[in-house]
Protein backbone atom coordinates (compact mmCIF):
# COMPACT_ATOMS: atom_id res chain seq x y z
CA UNK A 1 0.00 0.00 0.00
CA UNK A 2 2.88 2.35 0.70
CA UNK A 3 4.26 1.83 -2.79
CA UNK A 4 0.86 2.46 -4.37
CA UNK A 5 0.54 5.71 -2.42
CA UNK A 6 4.03 6.80 -3.42
CA UNK A 7 3.34 6.00 -7.07
CA UNK A 8 0.15 8.07 -6.91
CA UNK A 9 2.02 11.03 -5.39
CA UNK A 10 4.77 10.66 -7.99
CA UNK A 11 2.25 10.60 -10.84
CA UNK A 12 0.52 13.70 -9.47
CA UNK A 13 3.80 15.63 -9.13
CA UNK A 14 5.03 14.53 -12.57
CA UNK A 15 1.72 15.44 -14.19
CA UNK A 16 1.57 18.78 -12.40
CA UNK A 17 5.08 19.62 -13.60
CA UNK A 18 4.01 18.96 -17.19
CA UNK A 19 0.88 21.03 -16.76
CA UNK A 20 3.03 23.85 -15.38
CA UNK A 21 5.31 23.65 -18.41
CA UNK A 22 2.49 23.67 -20.96
CA UNK A 23 0.27 26.12 -19.07
CA UNK A 24 -1.78 28.52 -21.20
CA UNK A 25 -1.53 31.12 -18.41
CA UNK A 26 0.03 34.27 -19.92
CA UNK A 27 1.52 35.24 -16.55
CA UNK A 28 3.68 32.09 -16.46
CA UNK A 29 6.24 32.88 -19.15
CA UNK A 30 9.95 32.48 -19.64
CA UNK A 31 12.01 31.35 -16.71
CA UNK A 32 9.03 31.23 -14.33
CA UNK A 33 7.54 28.42 -16.40
CA UNK A 34 10.78 26.43 -16.34
CA UNK A 35 11.35 27.12 -12.64
CA UNK A 36 7.95 25.69 -11.81
CA UNK A 37 8.57 22.70 -14.06
CA UNK A 38 11.94 21.89 -12.50
CA UNK A 39 10.65 22.45 -8.97
CA UNK A 40 7.89 19.89 -9.46
CA UNK A 41 10.31 17.55 -11.22
CA UNK A 42 12.53 17.73 -8.14
CA UNK A 43 9.55 16.71 -6.00
CA UNK A 44 8.72 13.91 -8.43
CA UNK A 45 12.36 12.77 -8.47
CA UNK A 46 12.47 12.61 -4.69
CA UNK A 47 9.29 10.53 -4.59
CA UNK A 48 10.68 8.35 -7.41
CA UNK A 49 13.73 7.63 -5.29
CA UNK A 50 11.43 6.63 -2.41
CA UNK A 51 9.46 4.33 -4.75
CA UNK A 52 12.68 2.70 -5.86
CA UNK A 53 13.73 2.18 -2.23
CA UNK A 54 10.40 0.63 -1.23
CA UNK A 55 10.57 -1.63 -4.30
CA UNK A 56 13.64 -3.37 -2.89
CA UNK A 57 11.44 -5.10 -0.29
CA UNK A 58 9.66 -7.14 -2.98
CA UNK A 59 11.00 -10.37 -4.54
CA UNK A 60 13.62 -9.93 -7.24
CA UNK A 61 11.61 -11.12 -10.26
CA UNK A 62 8.24 -9.67 -9.27
CA UNK A 63 6.38 -7.27 -11.51
CA UNK A 64 5.81 -4.80 -8.69
CA UNK A 65 9.56 -4.43 -8.28
CA UNK A 66 9.86 -3.57 -11.98
CA UNK A 67 7.05 -1.04 -11.63
CA UNK A 68 8.81 0.58 -8.68
CA UNK A 69 11.83 1.31 -10.92
CA UNK A 70 9.79 3.08 -13.61
CA UNK A 71 9.61 6.55 -11.95
CA UNK A 72 13.36 6.56 -11.35
CA UNK A 73 13.93 5.57 -14.98
CA UNK A 74 11.83 8.48 -16.20
CA UNK A 75 13.70 10.88 -13.93
CA UNK A 76 17.03 9.64 -15.27
CA UNK A 77 15.74 9.85 -18.85
CA UNK A 78 14.82 13.50 -18.26
CA UNK A 79 18.33 14.19 -16.95
CA UNK A 80 19.88 12.51 -20.00
CA UNK A 81 17.71 14.56 -22.36
CA UNK A 82 18.68 17.78 -20.58
CA UNK A 83 22.36 16.83 -20.65
CA UNK A 84 22.09 16.05 -24.37
CA UNK A 85 20.43 19.39 -25.03
CA UNK A 86 23.13 21.20 -23.05
CA UNK A 87 25.90 19.44 -24.95
CA UNK A 88 24.57 19.50 -28.48
CA UNK A 89 22.35 22.60 -28.64
CA UNK A 90 25.07 25.04 -27.75
Image (tube, helix red, strand yellow):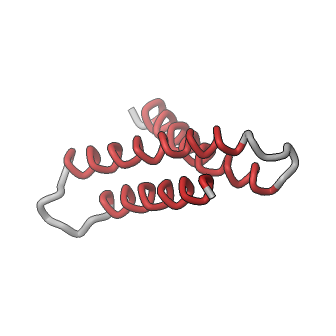
Residue at 47 percent across and 30 percent down: it is 87
| Position of 45 relative to 20 (above/below) | above
Q: Tell me where residue 52 appears, x and y as whole percent.
A: 64, 42
Residue at 37 percent across and 60 percent down: it is 16
Residue at 50 percent across and 54 percent down: it is 10
Residue 55: quadrant of the picture: top right
Q: Tell me where residue 64 appears, x and y as whole percent.
A: 75, 55
Q: Tell me where residue 85 appears, x and y as whole percent.
A: 45, 38
Comparing 46 with 59, the one in front is: 59
Furthest residue toward left: 27
Furthest residue toward front: 1
Q: Tell me where residue 25 appears, x and y as whole percent.
A: 18, 67
Q: Is residue 19 left or right of residue 54?
A: left
Residue at 65 percent across and 43 percent down: it is 54
| Position of 20 relative to 85 (above/below) | below
Q: Is residue 21 left or right of residue 31?
A: right
Query: In the rendered image, which quarter contains the N terminus?
Result: bottom right
Query: In the rendered image, which quarter contains the C terminus?
Result: top left
Amino acid sequence: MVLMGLLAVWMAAYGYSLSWLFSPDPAATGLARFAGFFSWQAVAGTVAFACWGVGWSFPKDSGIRRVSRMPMGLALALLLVLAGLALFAG
